Image (spheres, rainbow, N blue to C red):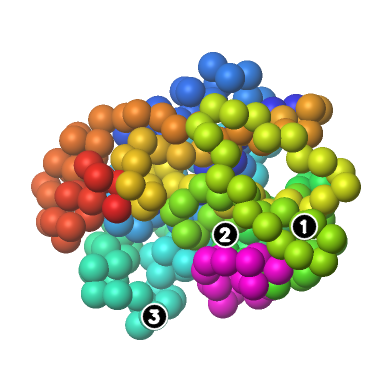
Amino acid sequence: MKTAVLSDIHANLEALVACMAHARRQGTERFVFLGDLVGYGADPLACLDLIRAELSRGSLAVRGNHDEAALGGLCEDLNFIARDAAYWTRSQLGAAERELLEQLPLQCRDGAALYVHASAADPGQWEYITGTESAQRCLTASDAPIVFAGHVHQPLLFYTAGEAIKTFAAGAGVAVPLSSRRRWLVLAGSVGQPRDGNPAAAYQLFDETECNVTCHRVAYDHATAARKILAAGLPAMLARRLAYGE
């Protein structure tokens, strides 16, 4: 089975539609959404409609910190720009959208893979995986051979090498074999707001049959997404950064 793992969509409809279409062309059979479905972007309702439809067909999703903020929590922990976006998003959500977000678990296990937004070490603390120490904590907290996480908006692989944890940045479109002799932590990158200097949306394609993972980068109409952010009255920086992937 091929599973497309999409994280940090952040209500960016143009990026979400582009990534889903690309994944289907690669033969994906289902989606996993790694949280932060909303926040920052101008299309929370449309994005949640698409995600709800995929969940009804057997896809999976977990909750992110911006989803939590949109429900009324965590705003004091966010910077001012993220907080403004969370308040705006909260005002847009109806009962159906709130119910969808409220029902999302913080993590879910499916076969060999664990899916979580931040770190499996304590999902509700929203720890950023920024290096080998935080990656080690995440892997130690679970016995899953493969952990998929988001939150940091940059795609990266961590893997065990004896007692050590090492990193590997695979090129876009390159399938990386996930050897059963190692454990793996896959940071999915961001669909809706990449922050690695590349404005193209990022997602991971997990081939469970071949046991490999491929990071894909997908160009999308970021200018339209930016115009919508400005038209909604959201902070202008959220629009500007889409053009640069920062």
Query: What's drawn in magenta, residue-wise?
Result: 120-136
Is residue 150 visible in the rendered image? The answer is yes
As for residue 124 lying within the magenta part, the answer is yes
Picture quadrant where residue 185 is located: bottom right
Report which residue position mark 1 lands on. 160
Report which residue position mark 2 lands on. 117
Q: Which of disc 1 and disc 3 is earlier in sequence? A: 3
Amino acid type, mark 2: His
Q: Residues within 10 Å of mark 1 (few under 14, many from 20)?
A: some
Q: Is residue 246 left or right of residue 226?
A: right
Q: Is residue 4 left or right of residue 70?
A: right
Secondary structure under tag 3 reads helix
Is residue 104 visible in the rendered image? The answer is no
Residue closest to the eye, 37 or 54: 37
As for residue 134 lying within the magenta part, the answer is yes
Q: Is residue 67 left or right of residue 234?
A: right
Residue 171, percent across and down? 53, 34
Amino acid type, mark 3: Asp
Secondary structure under tag 1 reads strand
If the image is split into quadrants, where does the N terminus sit?
A: top right
Q: Is residue 65 left or right of residue 61?
A: left
Question: Tag count in the figure?
Answer: 3
Mark nearer the viewer, 1 or 2: 1
Amino acid type, mark 1: Thr
Report which residue position mark 3 lands on. 77
Residue 126, percent across and down? 54, 72
Residue closest to the eye, 17 or 192: 192
Position of 69 relative to 48 (above/below): below
Residue closest to the eye, 30 or 168: 168
Q: Which of disc 2 and disc 3 is earlier in sequence? A: 3
